[in-house]
Image: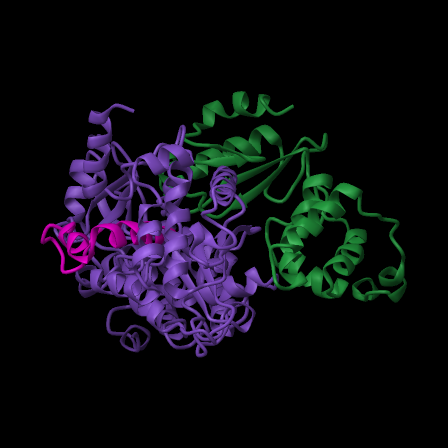
Amino acid sequence: MNDNLIRLTDLEREVPFALSDAERHEIEHALGHYPDGRAASIEALKIVQHHRGWVPDGALAPVAALIGISAADLEGVATFYSLIFRQPVGRHVIKLCDSISCYLTGYDELRAALEQQLGIGYGQTTPDQRFTLLPVCCLGACDRGPTLMIDDALHGDVAPGAVAELLAAYP
Amino acid sequence: MTRESTMTLAQQLLTKPLTARVNTAQPMDLAAFEASGGYRALRLALKELSPQDVQARVKDANLRGRGGAGFPAGVKWGLIPMGPDAGVKYLVCNADEMEPGTFKDRLLMEGAPHQLVEGILVAAYATQATTGYIFLRGEYVLAAARLNQALAEARAAGLLGRNILGSGWDFDCFVHTGAGRYICGEETALINSLEGRRANPRAKPPFPQIAGAWGRPTVINNVETLNNVAPIVLNGAEWFRGLSQGKSPDGGTKLYGVSGRAKRPGVFELPIGTTAREILEQHAGGMKDGYQLKCWLPGGASTDFLLPEHLDLAMDYDTIGKAGSRMGTGLLAVVDQTHNMVSVVRNLEEFFARESCGWCTPCRDGLPWTVKILRALEAGQGNSGDIEQLVSMTKALGPGRTFCAHAPGAMEPLQSALKFFRAEFEAGIRADHAPAAGSPASSAAG
């Protein structure tokens, strides 16, 4: 039962972390697009994620300081958005569209093929840290269902039998 | 470019103003776009028209918002405070295309990015906006790259920035990319997200035109809507109204489309008011061999199902509205006979439950409850009273009970599926739970 209690020592523990010059520079550039620093919060989180694959706890305080809001506030933003990753992900993130058009054109079979070949389910990462599998909202390519994205690349008309070859392109 | 092909494109632009220039493999750069008549509407507006003149043209054209609601863009603009003391104002393009079954704005942004930039510029001039944002979903990586390229070209050519084309008017525009969450497409949630907050919707009033982004007057228009603006300014309201060829009291063309098991799914620019039958049978080639049409969503996950008997309806806002659904985004998702409607609706409601922002209780609690019942029915483990409970959900989560239209939208496919396919839901009730006809449980339904 006590496991459910948050211990203050965890919250106060310093996590060694420093933003790289590149991250800092990119965040400062994004700040120039808005009348208010907070507006860059999502972009700043995406910049950290772009460089590190995910957003570690330690990033919150320095990013929040840079854009002028509290770390708690920034964490509230970070946890709201499904494409900000608050735990480590694999080298490649597979986003499988589970919305209606893909559902109507073979989503269930594609999901089964992916889970079988990867040996993982939604929200999980393969033991070799190669792939993370996530569901995603309609990817806006409904004429090519079923669809998925691997990293930034969109793949349409993905037959379950083509999954092995597709995955092989992402070492 | 030869004279002949220029003529051809110019003619195409008069009948298909949205897609004549679309080339997703290699979109026009600034030079090619200008050679095809691009930025002529902006030049005309800056040199010869007042902002009020531009507003009047769009109002006369009765351009209705293509994001799904169909609200007239000119009326929306008319609510913006004008005059020298109006101060900072924003023009936001809603490019957060995430409505399941909708794939039209991607085509425009990837295939003709300068067209959107010109539409934003003309709309911003009409409302005297000072800064613009393209609120683009994070997954549209290619669209982001192409829009940023188009904006950079426009900025370098003096079409964006300070003293645009020597007019004395300053305006700049930025691409703002999101990080997931369907709710960001709701315009007040979009504003919160643009400001860097959690994307919870805001209460209206105040409406964004009065107090939107950072408390300033803000116009939010959909990508397809904005793509219509420059052609209207250039060719006039009468031309725009004529584009519908008498098929609808509304003007213009519309990006229609078909997804699901059709022979040739895709997006088609057609006169607004084209029948669903023509869209499906003529342009998408009909259903794939071996599949029959069971029902269809006229424009996204948050629209009521319609039946094959509704195919001859004109796809415009009022006609589809009168038939008990909404045109929504105008892209049909066709359901074939192999699908059980309980499963189809379960898929839709899982989406809505996951994407609820959690702000309002009926939505946050009602949608997962709905999913739980649907999963039980799907597994043949439904209890007596489940269907009555779903019917009551369509009321409890309906319009007027939440800040935004997320929960009411989620109830549209559910209520219509219950209306048209009730037997499929009843079949999911456990045999030992099915009420006898005339029993208190069934007579209390409704």
Q: Which chain is green?
A: A
Residue B245: give x, y in percent of width and height. Answer: 11, 50
Residue B375 in which image quadrant:
bottom left
Residue A82 magenta-highlighted: no
* Membership of B232 in magenta stretch: yes
Quarter of the figure with residue B291? top left
Q: Is residue A49 left or right of residue A109?
A: right
Please report the residue visible at 67 percent of the width from the left and 38 percent of the height from the top.
A125
Q: Which hue belongs to chain B?
A: purple
Image spot of residue B5 (x, y percent): 23, 26
Of all residues, the one furthest to the front in this rendering is B166
Note whether residue B110 is visible. yes
User: Residue at position x 30%, y 60% from top?
Assistant: B49
Q: Give the residue displayed 78% in from the left and 52% down from the top.
A: A59
Q: Which quadrant of the figure contains the C terminus of chain B?
A: bottom left
Q: Where is the N terminus of chain B found, in terms of image quarters?
A: top left
Q: Is residue B379 visible?
A: no
Nearest the eye: B290 or B29:
B29
Across and down, in percent, residue B18 comes to: 29, 44
Residues in magenta, as a range: B223-252
Predominant secondary structure in magenta?
helix
